[in-house]
Amino acid sequence: MFAQRLKNLKPYKPGEQPKDREYIKLNANENPYLPSPKIKDALKDIELQKLALYPDPDSHELKKAIAKSLNKTGGVLVPAADQKPLGFEITEDMIFCGNGSDEVLSFVFYAFFDSDKPLVSPEFSYSFYPVYAGYYGINLLKVPLNADFTLDTKAMLTIDSTGMIFANPNAPTGMALSVDEIEAMLKAYPKDKVFVVDEAYTDFSGYTVLPLLKKYENLLVIRTFSKSMSFAGMRLGFAVGAPALIQALTTTKNSFNHFPTDAFCQASAIAACSDIEWYSENCRKIIKTRDAFSKALVDSGWNVLPSKTNFVLVSKDGMPGKAVYEAIKAKGILVRYFDIDVIRDFVRITIGTDEQMEKLLEIIRTI
Ligand SMILES: *Cc1c(COP(=O)(O)O)cnc(C)c1O
């Protein structure tokens, strides 16, 4: 009854959503702020007829709207003073849209990575990468992090690989390589292999590698609307890269599902892109809350990795992550712990509103 390949699947486990009581959810890196009110207007005006017809399979208007907003901001919602300008115009043919960046990533694994050589990734990065590698029979080689949780870029570059993938800023550490460090990697990396940087959290970091696309045609940048754009429930992710790479993703998509972004998604995301200031403001608030929360934790004697994201990875000496998680959960707040060596002592806490973080701090001070 079941195919052989089913036995080998090791599915991804998302953050829990228990229903036994009302929890404050700080366990899935969701955005605590509402999406732009302009979306409500856009959806109010959507004609029912639109739902009876197939959507635009290639999301043309949406891709134009995304390109326009990236060109407007320079590629990051709250740019740091020394983030370099794009230096070129991002055009529609450089963008691919999918049903969440998880789906975009699955097409990336399918389109660019072979099984004859390893795909290189850091030991700790987005935990969906090993899942897709297993799904497609790709040999994922995880390179251990340095002792300070930074990526061992030297070791990653010495491997003869079919491709490279990591999140920057990385998850679950929250730490980031600089744009210059990534450019140094690209310089040393073969030009005929795809180099993927997953920028799911980049809007909280001030920096993006998008300006490097001008020089490196093997660079592919993955983005999501789920985090900085308060859109996790709608499912929209995209890739930015050279038109040849985008074309390969489109071929893959059209061999699997023509219509990954539905009519609601396209209409509401176009509206979102017309109100970028709304999201920049929310992003600024989250960054401010994160830095204040991190400082308060450090002042209370906790260890906090320096985060460039909307979450922090933290630990308390002598207490395993699971125990911290349970103590916090008993008081009505969900965070995430990891049943993996090296980060077993940590919990990952999503940055919510100031009020939510105040409540959490009160709980944490009693632990
Ligand atoms: C959340 C996340 C994603 C997935 O985003 P979706 O668009 O919601 O599928 C991808 N990569 C990283 C590193 C993430 O943290």
Image (cartoon, grey):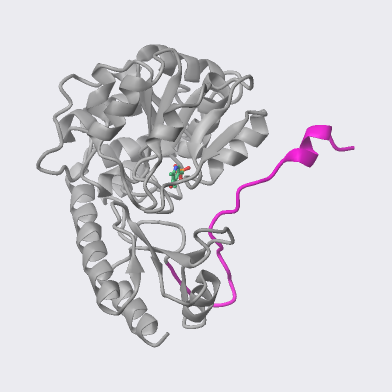
Query: Seen in the image, is 328 located left or right of residue 83?
Result: right
> Residue 20, position in %: x, y?
59, 76
> Residue 129, position in %: x, y?
54, 39
The image quadrant of residue 257 is top right
Query: Seen in the image, is 57 located left or right of residue 220?
Result: right
> Residue 179 or 159: which is nearer the viewer?
159
Residue occupying the far right of the picture: 1
Ligand 1 located in image quadrant:
top left
The answer to whether 54 is drawn above or below residue 124 in the figure is above
Task: Please state, as top left, top right, bottom left or bottom right, where the C terminus lies in the image.
Answer: bottom left
Residue occupying image coordinates x 55% and y 64%: 17
The answer to whether 364 is drawn above or below residue 222 in the figure is below
The answer to whether 175 is drawn above or below residue 298 in the figure is above
**Magenta run includes residue 291:** no
**Magenta run includes residue 16:** yes
> Residue 65, position in %: x, y?
27, 29
Residue occupying image coordinates x 54% and y 77%: 21
Query: Seen in the image, is 291 located left or right of residue 267?
Result: left
Residue occupying the far bottom of the picture: 366
> Residue 3, position in %: x, y?
83, 33
Total count of labels: 0
Is residue 144 visible in the rendered structure shown here? yes
> Residue 70 or 342: which is nearer the viewer?
342
Residue occupying image coordinates x 41% and y 11%: 244
Is residue 97 visible in the rendered structure shown here? no
Name the chief secondary structure element in magenta. loop
Q: Which residues are magenta?
A: 1-25
Residue occupying image coordinates x 33% and y 84%: 362
Task: Please state, as top left, top right, bottom left or bottom right, where the N terminus lies in the image.
Answer: top right
The answer to whether 29 is drawn above or below residue 197 in the figure is below
